[in-house]
Amino acid sequence: METIKPGTLVEVGGSESAQAESPEVTALVTRAKSGDAEAFEGLMRLYERRVIALGIQMGLSRDEALDSCQDVFVKVFRYIRGFRTGRSFYKWLYRIAINAIYDQLRWSRPSGVTSVELIDEVQAGRLYASGPAPDAQAESADLARKLLGHLGCLSKQERIVFVLRDLQEMGTDEIGRILNLSQVTVRRHCMSARQKLRDRLLPTKRI
């Protein structure tokens, strides 16, 4: 598996139309680009829990996820002046976060089972444009807890791909570009991860 060199910021090819971000985020980004420290701190408050949650989903301990989060925002502070207005800030931040977490995973211990006390923090970090109905939310949260509690059965590569593809709903082509993998390899890791989780959790059902 090809690795991403530490400090590398991966740009995913193709056009990127800006997702509808709130006027608050747009205003904070504009001010932060001009060097406004208070605006930058506002962006950190909005997104740091999501970055930490992503790190935990991908197999970091809470302390490692916190370290990666710090590294992410150091990079954001360094490069935000070059952020292109009209693009999605969250997608841009998200790519930086994936690279930082992926670098951390290269040096960390093999991923184990996600501890129960981290599940709520992971769930709180998930981003939905519009939330589902309460019953659907409860069912989804229950499945997420079961899945996250058994991600330790996956290899590191399988876990990264499964989190990005099935939990973060990222496209196969985008995952391949970020991780420097072919789409065939991404699909293979995803299928393997699903099979392992199916055997653990849903022996008679499909995920």
Image: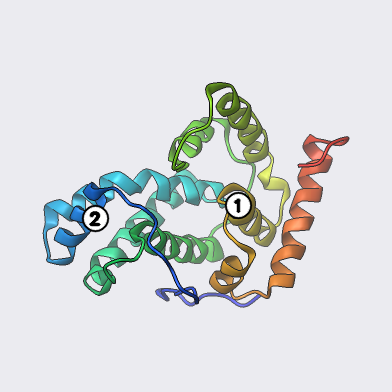
Q: Quadrant of residue 170?
A: bottom right
Quarter of the figure with the C terminus: top right
Asked whether 3 or 23 is in front, the reply is: 23
Give the percent coordinates (x, y) of residue 62: 46, 44
**SS of the residue at dot 1?**
helix
Q: Is residue 183 visible to us here?
A: yes
Q: Quadrant of residue 80?
A: bottom left
Local packing at callout 2 (Cα closer than 10 Å; few below 14, some 14-19, many 20+) is: some
Q: What residue is shown at x 25% (from left), y 74% (from top)? A: 82
Q: Is residue 52 above or below residue 143?
A: below
Q: Which callout, 2 or 1, points to the residue nearer the camera?
A: 2
Task: Residue under label 1, please give it.
Answer: 163
Q: Is residue 93 above or below residue 152?
A: below
Q: Is residue 203 left or right of residue 193?
A: right
**Amino acid at circle 1:** Val
Q: Is residue 43 left or right of residue 140?
A: left
**Amino acid at circle 2:** Thr
Give the percent coordinates (x, y) of residue 33: 18, 66
Q: How many marks?
A: 2
Quarter of the figure with the N terminus: bottom right
Local packing at callout 1 (Cα closer than 10 Å; few below 14, some 14-19, many 20+) is: many
First in sequence: mark 2 or mark 1?
2
**SS of the residue at dot 2?**
helix
Q: What residue is shown at x 61% (from left), y 69% (from top)? A: 173
**Image disc number at residue 26:** 2
Asked whether 64 or 206 is in front, the reply is: 206
Give the percent coordinates (x, y) of residue 140: 61, 32
